[in-house]
């Protein structure tokens, strides 16, 4: 009855061997290809560095003015613009300007990457059930696997720095945009698509002229979620060498600096709120035709 | 009917929904019905040996209850649904042999469609909706918006160009749908229960707009409906479908005077016969003038009754549109015509 009380597990030495094999295999892999992969990401790193410097070196009034302009273009709401202005003044006054600029830079690049990869992926999923069936489990894993776990291979391959940080942020933040692009396109009214078909529209005309515009509000909800999740990853990304608001938070945790942690944490929250409100307002304005009633 | 006047010729068209098509098709060809097929092979019989000739410049109505296959049939004409077997000739080209490129060309140039639920593009303005069929043919914006403008005006929506469909009433939305279909100048207009979703007054108004347009444009129109009054009002010919099979395809008068079976009889039992049956359907052919008044052969019985009531004993003379005498009608013919045919008699005593 021994097997009944003790789980029939692998012997310890076997298990050790197993782990060793996996570890060595991956170490070998990263030794062989690490260099090449790093070189592959070199342009991205250059861009990241340049982009971050651009944010940090540009005089603050210009940055604030540009941000306010973007907030106005996105939301067309005085309230949001004023709120954004006050928030950034406050952040700067408390000495977090530079960190905020670093965070802003990496968040923008991450969001752009997620959109550039996520939307075509979502379109492919909407087009074919097989592609959907293949990608959905991958997205599930990406969303549930603890971030620290995929940090390990990323760091082993690329070391510590901006690029692995960016990759970690993207892995965490990309699922919503993919899912919601797929959903948005699939939810487009079949009757309307049939109408487009009946007039002889080809695949691209249907996609760009009918499906994408009608799915845009949903896709935009995905962009919004992606930005939020990217911001949520800032602290974890700072563990592998990403500069920005996450780093002081990390320091605050290890040294129990309450004020430092709170200030930087709140700065992240403020960024999140601004991003969220502006993109949501923008999303709403895009579906203006839905909200207007009959005469 | 000479072959030149036939624009679309549907022959031996079958559609079976579901898997195992090949086997199911043989079963259907050997006479298996819809219910039995569903039970035996889990396939749904959509269309069963449809043969239909559609005349150039005429309005062909296809009628039937829901599930009878009428919407399936109309979607075969522009291949929104692919058939299981059969042939659809348009000017001697088999539509079913078109490559996907040719099919797109065909849909752009030869056939346009109006939908029951309008199916307008909610994110496009009225102008962009109407111009859609042209815009996707890479026609310049100036050109398509000018044409779209013309059709918007023609359906009476002047001034609504910049509105979105969601801002318009149902009747107005379907006018946009009609204008969108007309804007491509396609020869054939497919109308899938186009007016069914509208309330009766608007529906009647839309029917008049359609007839008015048709008297000028002479399109070939395939009009799906489940409403007999509508079919009689606009149809030059009426085909009746039941469970995917064609039960009758004839002149509207013929359908009322000689329903092919119980199903068709059921359809027509509630209509006001005096208001739809025309003189030519009940007259006694003759070429001599009778003692009473002279009326046209397409006058309905109700109106003839009005005329005869002044002199009931005098038969009226019937003449055709060219003024030639073709027959006469006596009071007894009128009474005979208005009463339901024998096959429908069951419900009179009940």
Image (cartoon, coloured by chain):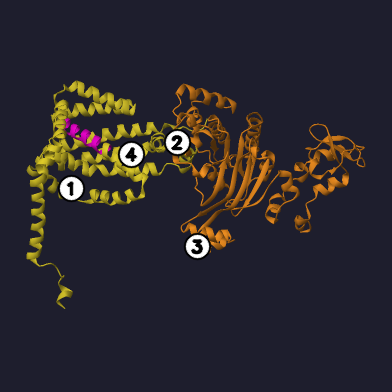
Q: On the image, numbered disc 3 is attached to which residue?
A: B41
1 and 2 marks on the same chain: yes
**Front-most of residues A68 and A44:** A44
Element type where label 4 sits in the image = helix
Relative image position of residue B207 (x, y in whole percent): 64, 36
**Mark number displayed over residue B143:** none
Magenta span has A105?
A: yes
Rendered image quadrant of residue A155 = top left
Q: On the image, numbered disc 1 is attached to which residue?
A: A147
Element type where label 3 sits in the image = helix
Up/down of A186 relative to A209, above or below: below
Q: CA distance from mark 1 to mark 2?
A: 44 Å
Q: CA distance from mark 3 to mark 2?
A: 36 Å
Q: CA distance from mark 4 to mark 1?
A: 23 Å
Q: Is residue B341 visible?
A: yes
Relative image position of residue A250 (x, y in whole percent): 11, 41
Magenta span has A84?
A: no
Q: Residue B262 vs residue A293: left or right?
A: right
Q: On the image, numbered disc 4 is attached to which residue?
A: A221
**Front-most of residues B112 and A73:** B112
User: Which chain letter goes with mark 3?
Assistant: B
Q: Which residues are magenta?
A: A99-115
């Amino acid at each position: 009855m021994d097997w009944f009380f003790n789980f029939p597990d692998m012997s310890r030495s076997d298990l050790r061997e197993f782990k060793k094999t996996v570890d060595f295999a991956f170490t070998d892999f990263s030794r062989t290809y690490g260099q090449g992969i790093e070189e592959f990401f070199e342009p991205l790193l250059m861009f990241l560095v340049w982009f971050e410097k651009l944010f940090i070196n540009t005089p603050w009034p210009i940055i604030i003015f540009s941000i306010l302009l973007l907030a106005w273009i996105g939301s067309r709401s005085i309230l949001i613009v004023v709120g954004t202005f006050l928030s950034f003044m406050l952040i700067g006054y408390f000495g977090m300007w530079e960190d905020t600029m670093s965070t802003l830079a990496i968040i923008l690049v991450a969001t752009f990457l997620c959109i550039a990869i996520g939307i075509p992926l979502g379109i492919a999923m909407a087009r074919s059930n097989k592609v959907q069936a293949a990608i959905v489990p991958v997205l599930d894993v990406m969303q549930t696997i603890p971030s620290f776990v995929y940090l390990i291979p990323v760091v082993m391959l690329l070391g510590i720095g901006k690029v692995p940080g960016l990759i970690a942020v993207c892995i965490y933040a990309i699922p919503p945009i993919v899912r919601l692009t797929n959903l948005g396109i699939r939810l487009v009214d079949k009757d309307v698509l049939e109408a487009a078909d009946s007039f002889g529209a080809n695949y691209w005309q249907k996609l760009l002229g009918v499906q994408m515009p009608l799915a845009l509000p949903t896709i935009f909800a995905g962009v919004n979620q992606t930005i939020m999740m990217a911001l949520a990853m800032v602290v974890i990304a700072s563990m592998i060498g990403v500069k920005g608001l996450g780093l002081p938070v990390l320091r605050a945790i290890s040294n129990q600096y309450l004020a430092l942690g709170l200030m930087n944490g709140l700065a992240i929250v403020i960024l999140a709120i601004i991003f969220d409100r502006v993109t949501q307002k923008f999303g709403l304005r895009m579906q203006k035709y839905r909200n207007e009633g009959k005469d | 009917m000479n072959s030149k006047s036939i624009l679309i010729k549907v022959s031996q068209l079958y559609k079976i929904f579901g898997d195992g098509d090949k086997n199911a098709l043989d079963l259907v060809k050997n006479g298996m019905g819809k219910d039995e097929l569903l039970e035996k092979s889990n396939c749904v019989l959509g269309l069963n040996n449809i043969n239909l000739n559609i005349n150039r410049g005429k309005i062909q109505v296809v009628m039937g209850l829901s599930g009878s296959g009428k919407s399936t049939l109309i979607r075969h004409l522009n291949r929104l649904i692919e058939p299981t077997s059969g042939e659809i000739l348009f000017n001697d080209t088999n539509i079913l042999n078109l490559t996907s490129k040719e099919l797109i060309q065909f849909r752009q140039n030869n056939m346009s469609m109006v939908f029951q639920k309008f199916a307008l593009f909610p994110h496009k303005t009225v102008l962009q909706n109407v111009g859609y069929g042209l815009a996707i043919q890479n026609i310049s914006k100036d050109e398509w918006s000018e044409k779209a403008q013309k059709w918007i005006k023609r359906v009476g929506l002047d001034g609504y160009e910049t509105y979105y469909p969601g801002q318009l009433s149902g009747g107005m939305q379907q006018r946009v749908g009609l204008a969108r279909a007309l804007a491509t100048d396609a020869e054939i207009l497919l109308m899938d229960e186009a007016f069914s979703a509208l309330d009766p007054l608007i529906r009647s108004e839309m029917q008049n707009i359609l007839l008015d347009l048709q008297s000028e444009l002479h399109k070939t129109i395939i009009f799906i409906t489940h409403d007999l009054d509508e079919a009689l009002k606009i149809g030059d010919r009426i085909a009746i479908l039941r469970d995917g099979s064609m039960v009758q395809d004839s002149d509207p008068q013929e359908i009322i005077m000689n329903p092919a079976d119980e199903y068709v009889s059921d359809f027509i039992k509630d209509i006001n016969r005096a208001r739809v049956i025309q003189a030519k359907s009940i007259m006694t052919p003759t070429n001599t003038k009778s003692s009473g008044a002279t009326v046209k052969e397409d006058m309905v019985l109700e109106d003839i009754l009005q005329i005869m009531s002044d002199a009931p004993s005098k038969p009226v003379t019937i003449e055709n549109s060219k003024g030639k005498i073709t027959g006469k009608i006596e009071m007894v013919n009128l009474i005979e015509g208005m009463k339901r045919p024998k096959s429908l008699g069951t419900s009179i005593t009940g």
